[in-house]
Image (cartoon, helix red, strand yellow):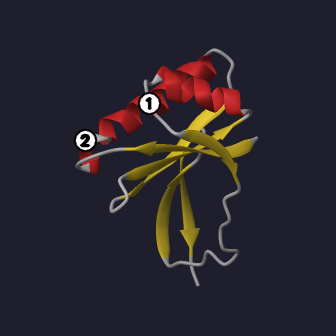
């Protein structure tokens, strides 16, 4: 499984794009029900640039393309990426995280 970023442009308030994020996630889920391996992991908005990066986890670029076009997303490109996370993720308290497959996990992190 690899990670991919879909680069798209938006204009105006990113709140107007929020329903589209939900549609992208729903389209990926429908494709999984048909046997594809594709999950929308997150969306990151660069407000000053009016760019959105949608992070997917998928078996192929084709699966990501099918998810994006199936949700009628206009995008510039799809790029395979590597996400790096710090080794020391120590925090105090409970953090809610969601896995790419949509399940919600709770982790206890303490110093």
User: What residue is shown at x 60% (from left), y 18% (from top)?
Assistant: 33
Looking at the image, residue 33 sits to the left or right of residue 96; the answer is right
- Mark 1 is surrounded, within 10 Å at the Cα level, by few (under 14), some (14 to 19) or many (20 or more) other residues, namely some
User: What residue is shown at x 56% (from left), y 62% (from top)?
Assistant: 107
Residue toward you, 92 or 19: 19
Residue 101 in percent (x, y) is at 60, 38
Label 1 SS: loop
Task: Give the vertical position of 82 relative to 79 (above or below).
Answer: below
Residue 47, image quadrant:
bottom left
Q: Where residue 73 is drawn, which disc sits there?
A: 1
User: What residue is shown at x 68% (from left), y 23% (from top)?
Assistant: 36
Q: Where residue 16 is drawn, which disc sits there?
A: 2
Label 2 SS: helix
Looking at the image, residue 104 sits to the left or right of residue 13; the answer is right
Residue 15 in percent (x, y) is at 25, 47
Front disc: 2 or 1? 1
């Amino acid at each position: 499984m690899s990670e991919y970023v879909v680069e798209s442009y938006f204009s105006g308030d990113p709140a107007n794009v929020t329903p589209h994020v939900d549609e992208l996630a729903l389209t990926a889920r429908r494709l999984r029900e048909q046997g594809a391996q594709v999950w929308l992991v997150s969306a990151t908005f660069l407000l000053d640039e009016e760019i959105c990066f949608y992070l997917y986890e998928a078996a192929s670029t084709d699966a990501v393309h099918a998810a994006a076009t199936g949700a009628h997303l206009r995008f510039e490109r799809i790029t395979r990426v590597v996400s790096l996370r710090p080794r020391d993720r120590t925090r105090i308290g409970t953090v809610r995280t969601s896995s790419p497959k949509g399940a919600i996990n709770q982790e206890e992190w303490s110093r």
